[in-house]
Amino acid sequence: MTATTPLIPPHDIKIEESILGSMIATKQGLDDAMQILKDPTIFFKPEHIDIFFAIQQMYTNSEPIDLETLSAKMRALKKPNEILLIELVRKTVSAAHIEYHCRLLLQFKMRRMIVLFNAQITAMAMDESIDVFDLMARWTKEFDTVNNLILTGRKTQTIAEALFDLGKRIELISKSTTETPLTGIHTGFKRINHFTGGYQPQDLVILAARPGMGKTAKALKTVVENAKINVPVGIISLEMSVQQIIARIVAIDTNFHLKQLLKTGFDKLQYFDSYHQHTVRIAKYPIYMDDSGNSDITDIIILARMWKRKYGIKLLVIDYLQLMTDKSRGHNRENEVSSVSRRLKLLAKELEIPVIVLAQLSRAVETRGATKRPMLSDIRESGSIEQDADIVEFIYRPEYYSIDAKNWDEEMVAEGANTEIIFAKYRAGSIGTTYLKWLGNKTKFIDPTDDKETENQYKEEVAEQTETDNDEVIF
């Protein structure tokens, strides 16, 4: 019987020797490596683990590090190995490529971790007594641990490098010939594009309002405008069904009324013809939806990663935050929400896409006097949410509270709008307010300047059907 050769975990001894030699021989090599390497087990060879452990202790305590002092430290730790230390220094040429070598070492560590937890997960999967959802949660947790190594030792930027990057951004904006230059993902509205430059990759955007204010309508407008230009988008709905979502998408992207799409139906044959023409176009949109109701953040992360890998999504919308859970945090709701918001931010960074999360405001808004404009403290279970978010947007429609038009914002009225979009937090810019117009009978927002364009676009169709009640006309 032939003996099976055991598999050796991924590693590279020569790279380990080069890094340790540079750390011992040069101050530059020491400082560069210590920014990236945090765990002795990043090294594979046991002797190398011992040496890095000693260096790490000395570096933390601001002790001088050279061949002699390190040899003394190793003896104190009862891990003497002077011959190896001398050999490491002797092989060192320079510290020129130490950062590159350290990142290669991180990759070998990640490979070993994947090999290990893959074996563990495989063994658990064979055990039918283990709940499959617990298994998936364990898999995701282990994968997150590996993934976090990618964030280790991010390079510090000098002010010169940062200024260069800023210059490139300014150049991109300045060269744009569009009315609303974008440096990120289309927000769905010219006004908001102009205010933000688009939602940026890695942004966590919280869109908050009271129920019925139009959160879903605004988010779906963002989805539709991106889908029109072939940008793949994912929607996770914890409240609405896919049928409800698609009806809203159709209403937003056409002149149909949501009421007839979901309740009353069509009373003229030409409406059916128009509907089918629109569906041929909309069916090509790269929109991916899930209404399974899996509210645990682990399930949501798994789904988002799959969509990113399979469909290349560039935007994720989740409806809504307060329905999300984190089983790993037990029954403490405050800790649970903190974990959810933090993991959502990490998900945006990992996938390098904007993540828009809808959120409910507390009833405190409605008990407030005067204008009832929302504030950050009105977000239910808000503490960590506003901390993790890059953007917090509020929707405020004064007519929702039956506030007389004479008490509306004068600038909003002058622009033909009826809705304030309040940027209560904007990490990359200034807080402020811009305006949209809410069309209640169509359940959608538009830019105020689009109202005239829409009127002209459908003028002929309206003229042909004058006998039908305006509120019931759909195209």
Image (cartoon, grey):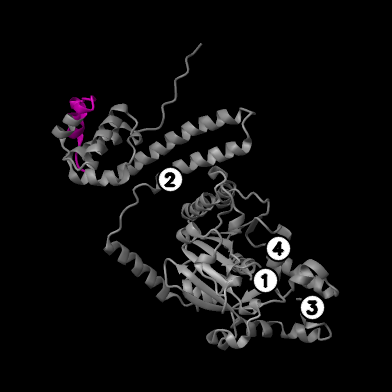
Residue 295 on image: x %, y %: 62, 50
- What's the residue type where badge 3 is placed? Glu
Residue at the (28%, 34%) spot, across then down: 53
Residue 41 on image: x %, y %: 35, 34
Magenta region: which residues?
74-95
Q: Where does label 2 land, which residue? A: 148
Which tag, 3 or 2, sits closer to the chain's start?
A: 2
Element type at marker 1? helix
* Inter-mark Cα distance, 4 to 3: 20 Å
Element type at marker 2? helix
* Inter-mark Cα distance, 1 to 2: 39 Å
Assess disc 1: are there few (<14), some (14-19) or many (≥20) residues with their C-alpha within 10 Å of its C-alpha: many
- Quadrant of residue 129 in the image? top right
Q: Where does label 3 land, which residue? A: 472
Closer-to-camera residue (220/430)? 430
Q: Tell me if label 4 and label 1 are in contact, CB under 8 Å.
A: no
353 vs 363: above or below: above
